[in-house]
Image: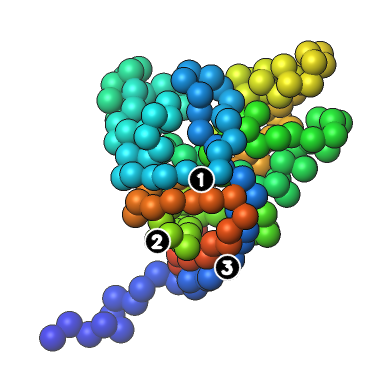
Amino acid sequence: MPDPSSNPAPDIAVTPVMKRSGHVVMVAAAVENAVGTGRLAELVLTHEGIPGDRHAGFLRPADVRVPWFERHAPIQNERQLSIVSMEDLAVIAGNLGIERVEPEWLGANIAVEGVPDFSFLPRGTRLFFPSGAVLAVMGQNDPCRIAGAEVERHLGGQGGLALRFAAAAKRLRGVVAIVDRPGSIRGGEGFKLRIPEQWIWQG
């Protein structure tokens, strides 16, 4: 029988599973092909996301965010929903020198509060809601000039916001997620998080 001690596991620091909680501030869905979203009392989710939302579905066409794929090739949709935190939006607003950034201006489907460094939640984090709905975080949502233009539009065309937005919102625009388990999510309710083990692969 092989001796396990002769082939030890790599000496890589592993952060154990963590559990946290937060609060839903608002929920919203996209209106046709608009960049922004419109607030709702409740989101009803299927495995494909939000029915009728422009980001719903199991597949999506490849775009500039995934240059390793041929443009428009059908790929896995890891962005059924966009989730932001009010704390991160306040930092973005401060970086831009404006009073506020509303979640729906950025096309967010869910805005939360009470979770530190929300935009840095690792891939595989699960969010559990009272209805039984579960969302799985797939990664950060990169800021773009299109979202910046939407912010600028809502503020009456203040010059330069669209160009400055990407830098001001870098690693602060929240996360994208998919539906692990269908259900509903309402503004005002609490939710639980399960953050998976984390480690840094260095090769």
Q: Residues within 10 Å of mark 2 (few under 14, many from 20)?
A: few
- Taking 159 as reference, is 143 above or below it? below
For mark 3, give the secondary structure: strand
Specify the label residue 42 is tagged with.
1
Q: Is residue 48 above or below residue 145?
A: below
Look at the numbered disc 2 and give the secondary structure of its residue: loop
**Is 197 or 184 nearer to us in this picture?**
184
Q: Secondary structure at mark 1?
A: strand
Name the residue located 57 percent from the left edge and 68 percent from the top edge. 20
Residue at (37, 34) in percent of width and height:
51
In the image, which disc is placed on residue 132? 2
User: Identity of the amino acid at label 3?
Assistant: Arg
Mark 3 vs mark 1: in front: 1
Chain-order first, disc 2 or disc 3: 3
- Tell me the CA gap for discs 1 and 2: 14 Å
The circle drawn on residue 51 is none
Kindly identify the residue that appears in the image at 36 percent across and 24 percent down.
62
Q: Which image quadrant: the N terminus?
A: bottom left
Residue that numbered label 3 is attached to: 20
Question: Residue 107: x, y in percent?
Answer: 57, 31
Q: Residues under labels 3 and 1: Cα distance?
A: 23 Å
Q: How is the image coloured?
A: rainbow
Where residue 174 sits, quadrant-wise, is top right
Q: Nearer the viewer, mark 1 or mark 2?
A: 1
